[in-house]
Image: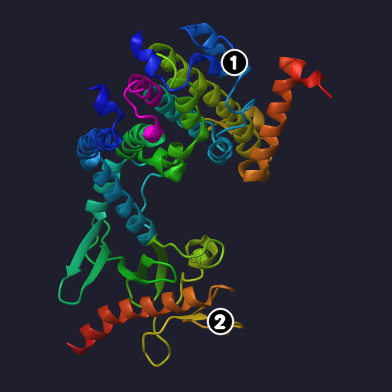
């Protein structure tokens, strides 16, 4: 034993054993907490959808409560063929949706951007926009997730005068009050351009193909 | 205990402070007061400044550190006689990381909102100098029981300082305490600076100054 302790192999064997024990322990803990973590992540996703659709829910709602509100008010319509997901807000008692949220995603400057854009019942006026994931430069591109930027979208139209889908995130001086334009972020030209592209792509995927059908 | 001779560094490294040899009270006192990890050693400042804008966050973070220092000190101490000297740091980090991840997973599963507020700082306990410092400086040379006391004492010392900063920052920055607002404070306009990082620096600076006043002049202060 003493001989083995002094051998070169001992630290290797020791590290391997310790690593194995730690890994085993973490696997057990990870497996045990997994259903709870996944439920929390799911509820978080639902919270974003509820927020962007402006479904009223208590601010301190638990995960279970969020799921309950979500199930009562929101209809999820997945379109496998087109690869789109729509969240329709149908308040209890109502027959037609009050608002519809569409998921969009795409490549940002540093990583993927995922978000939701909510439209009023006319399928043209924007109700709100939210991001579920973004890793843009903090202070520059990261500002897309800030309130002042997102609030600009409220009340904007997704179609221009000729009826074509085209939200514009303007660079430099914007035509004030243009119905499809929001102010871009100085110093975040690339992020804004990519965001504009992915928004319009998602909207076209839902609306343009349905019109051609 | 013949095994103790295998310990790479002897007890002499404590410098005769009396922390060795199962002196629990002494060890506790050192961690919390005379050798407080934050106000004396100025370790673990990063998280102490980052998560103290709310008292609740500071308390959870303090609890997390107590859990990790106690757990890692215990296991590093238990393994001290079989750990090869060359890989001892890897072993320490593996033990520490295991405890931190367990705590992080626990928060994510049962206290989701708290986990979101603390963000990456729970995971960053792995790199907190206090934890590694205690494992390396204390647990590696001392038996398990007194190592637990040392881990607890240092965790508690950290937690107390964090809680104090948290109280000051939440009170001045938001006018609340643990989320409750006081009717008497309704005239107070919250000072945003206290919520931001500079507020944490000011608070910690004043706290360390106050600590030094309370502790009185020290022998080393007399030196030119």
Q: Does residue B75 belong to the magenta stretch?
A: yes
A103 w.r.t. B80: above or below: below
Q: Residue at x 54, y 18 (%)?
A: B13
Q: Which residue is mark 2?
A: A171
Mark 2 secondary-structure assignment: loop
In the image shown, does A212 or B91 lie closer to the viewer? B91
User: Which chain's residue wears label 1?
Assistant: B
Residue, far bottom:
A162
Q: Nearer the viewer, mark 1 or mark 2?
A: 1
Judge left or right: residue B92 versus residue A26.
Answer: right
Give percent across and percent down for residue B95. Answer: 35, 32
Let me know if residue B1 appears in the view: yes
Q: Residues within 10 Å of mark 2 (few under 14, many from 20)?
A: some
Q: Residue at x 52, y 13 (%)?
A: B28
Report the predominant secondary structure element of the magenta stretch.
helix
Let me know if residue B187 appears in the view: no
A6 w.r.t. A41: above or below: above
Are discs 1 and 2 located on one and the same chain? Answer: no
A136 w.r.t. B201: above or below: below
Give percent across and percent down for residue A192. Answer: 48, 75
A10 w.r.t. A114: above or below: above
In the image shown, does B54 or A160 lie closer to the viewer? B54
Q: Which residues are magenta?
A: B72-88
Q: Which residue is mark 1?
A: B15
Mark 1 secondary-structure assignment: loop
Give percent across and percent down for residue B119. Answer: 44, 45
Give percent across and percent down for residue B63. Answer: 44, 26
- Name the image quarter holding residue B96: top left
Q: Residue at x 51, y 22 (%)?
A: B154
Judge left or right: residue B169 versus residue A202.
Answer: right
Image color mode: rainbow
Q: Does residue B117 belong to the magenta stretch?
A: no
């Amino acid at each position: 034993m003493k001989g083995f302790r002094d051998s070169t192999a001992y630290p290797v064997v020791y590290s391997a054993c310790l690593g194995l024990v730690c890994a085993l322990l973490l696997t057990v803990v990870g497996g045990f907490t997994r259903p709870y973590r996944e439920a929390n992540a799911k509820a978080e996703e639902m919270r974003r959808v509820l927020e962007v659709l402006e479904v009223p829910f208590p601010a301190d709602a638990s995960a279970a409560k969020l799921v309950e509100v979500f199930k009562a008010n929101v209809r999820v319509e997945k379109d496998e063929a087109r690869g789109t997901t729509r969240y329709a807000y149908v308040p209890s008692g109502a027959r037609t949706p009050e608002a519809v949220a569409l998921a969009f995603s795409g490549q940002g400057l540093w990583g993927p951007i995922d978000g939701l854009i909510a439209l009023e019942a006319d399928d043209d006026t924007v109700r709100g926009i939210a991001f579920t994931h973004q890793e843009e430069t903090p202070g520059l591109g990261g500002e897309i997730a800030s309130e002042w930027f997102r609030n600009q979208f409220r009340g904007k139209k997704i179609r221009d005068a000729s009826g074509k889908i085209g939200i514009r995130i303007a660079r430099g001086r914007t035509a004030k009050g243009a119905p499809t334009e929001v102010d871009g972020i100085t110093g975040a030209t690339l992020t804004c351009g990519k965001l504009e592209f992915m928004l319009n792509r998602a909207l076209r995927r839902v609306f343009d193909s349905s019109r051609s059908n | 205990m013949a095994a103790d001779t295998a310990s790479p560094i002897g007890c002499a490294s404590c410098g005769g402070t009396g922390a060795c040899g199962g002196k629990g009270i002494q060890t506790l006192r050192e961690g919390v007061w005379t050798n407080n990890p934050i106000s004396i050693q100025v370790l673990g400042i990063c998280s102490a400044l980052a998560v103290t804008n709310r008292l609740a966050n500071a308390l959870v973070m303090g609890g997390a550190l107590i859990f990790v220092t106690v757990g890692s000190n215990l296991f590093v101490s238990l393994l001290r006689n079989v750990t090869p000297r060359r890989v001892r740091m890897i072993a320490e980090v593996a033990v520490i990381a295991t405890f931190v991840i367990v705590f992080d997973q626990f928060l994510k599963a049962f206290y989701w909102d708290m986990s979101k507020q603390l963000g990456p700082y729970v995971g960053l306990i792995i790199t907190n100098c206090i934890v590694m410092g205690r494992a390396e400086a204390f647990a590696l040379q001392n038996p398990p029981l007194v190592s637990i006391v040392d881990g607890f004492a240092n965790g508690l010392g950290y937690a107390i300082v964090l809680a104090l900063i948290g109280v000051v920052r939440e009170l001045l920055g938001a006018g609340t305490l643990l989320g409750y607002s006081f009717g008497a404070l309704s005239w107070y306009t919250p000072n945003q600076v206290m919520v931001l990082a500079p507020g944490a620096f000011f608070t910690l600076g004043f706290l360390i100054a106050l600590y030094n006043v309370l502790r009185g002049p020290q022998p080393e202060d007399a030196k030119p």
